[in-house]
Amino acid sequence: MRYHAVTLHAMRLLLLSNSVDHGRGYLDHAAEEIVSFLGQVERVLFVPFAARDHLAYSHNVRARFLALGIEVERAQPDRASRGAVERAEAVFVGGGNTFRLLDRLQRAGLLDALRRKVLEGTPYIGASAGSVIAAPTLKTTNDMPIVEPASFEALALVPFQINCHYAGPGASSSHMGETREQRIEEFHEENDAPVVGLREGTWLRREAGVLKLRGAPGARLFRRGCSPLELSDGADLSFLLEDPAT
Amino acid sequence: MRYHAVTLHAMRLLLLSNSVDHGRGYLDHAAEEIVSFLGQVERVLFVPFAARDHLAYSHNVRARFLALGIEVERAQPDRASRGAVERAEAVFVGGGNTFRLLDRLQRAGLLDALRRKVLEGTPYIGASAGSVIAAPTLKTTNDMPIVEPASFEALALVPFQINCHYAGPGASSSHMGETREQRIEEFHEENDAPVVGLREGTWLRREAGVLKLRGAPGARLFRRGCSPLELSDGADLSFLLEDPAT
């Protein structure tokens, strides 16, 4: 998919690796960044579809955002929500299971509406699964494929893949003895897109055509056929936006 | 899908959680069981599609089986392999990435041929991904979805789901802080099928209508809305075959 440079320049993203950090409260580690990112926004449309219980999830998110002085509207998993997306001042897509999230967005016909809205400049905040779907596909999720979405294609708001909760090098992951790095290497046996492994406590912020990494734990960049590259807090990753395919 | 009881009675399966156990050599922990399961079989058709490098993989498998006195033929990922499936004395589907394995079987049009062949009584050995696809779907794989298969539907040789390399209760898995048990609970938020979590060093053997668990580490059975059930070496799991849907 190709967008005009002017559209891409308007895009505003805040993609969090995780929503709960090391025993702190929900979104506490990113609260300051969220407030600075949302600026004058008074009301956020919350997409809870990655979780099973939308009501309970929205209740928690509403309480957290109210403490920041921001109201929360809950998106419904149906086509009628397209109007809510179109009216949204900003969107927050929460974590949970990425397959379920993508499936519900597809079934509700909200994927295109959401993509168009963000391309127009509406601020998009993602956490975990909500960050993963900002990539072209969900192929770098850590989640179990409990639901079969119609397609693995996601929002493609950035031209690279995102792996949240990245741990490594070294720490073994879901497979006994298989590290997260090995899983991402396996991705590159089949795919070309670079992968940003976002450690917990980190996030990506994109605005005015600039993409920056924030958070002390840093991140790791994997490119097919290259050695992984360690990325530090504050790193300018705008070069990753220059994929001619997006 | 529904099969006649007579067909189901003929089915012979050996489903290994893993092919390398705790620092031992490839298939060493299951060599005796494989020999007993294959009986008079002289030649096995090996399906290496879960790995990237089919040749290297088959080379290793051939060496291991030759040491057991069994020849190995490598399946090719194309429709011409249907004849090889139809002629096979026995089939061994190796581990790797479950999404890639299912995708290649679907693209080569081999899924139905393989299913029919096993229903006729041809012995089927699976290891890891090769065991996962014996279930109705791949929805309980631990693998990263690096490839998008046309469908999540797999061989459905048993009416329950299989989770290989099962670790727990307690051990955290791919997600930071998320246990394998939590991932399987998430599966049951969306699906009804029971899940057998096969710890490393265990396997399921099905013949003459009887399904048994083998291996000292045991397994864990998860059913929607029930507490998990611990399963021990030698447990008769034939009750799991009584799902009226298969």
Image (cartoon, coloured by chain):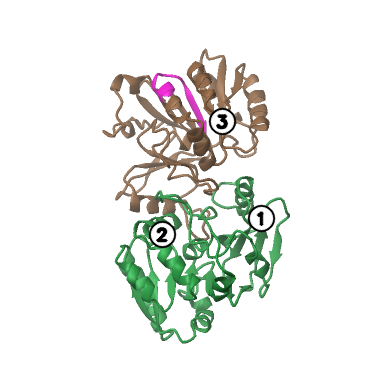
Chain colours: A green, B brown
CA–CA distance between discs 2 and 3? 32 Å
Q: Secondary structure at mark 2?
A: helix
Q: Secondary structure at mark 3?
A: loop
Determine the residue located farthest toward the top in the rendered image: B40
Q: Amino acid at mark 2?
A: Leu
Q: Residues within 10 Å of mark 3 (few under 14, many from 20)?
A: many
CA–CA distance between discs 2 and 1? 29 Å
Q: Residues within 10 Å of mark 1 (few under 14, many from 20)?
A: few
In x, y percent, where is residue B31?
Answer: 57, 25
Chain of the residue on which disc 1 is drawn: A
Q: Is residue B128 in sight in this rendering?
A: no
In x, y percent, where is residue A223?
Answer: 68, 55
Q: Which residues are magenta?
A: B116-128
Which image quadrant: the N terminus of chain B?
Answer: top left
Label at residue B77: 3
Magenta span includes B146: no
Chain of the residue on which disc 3 is drawn: B
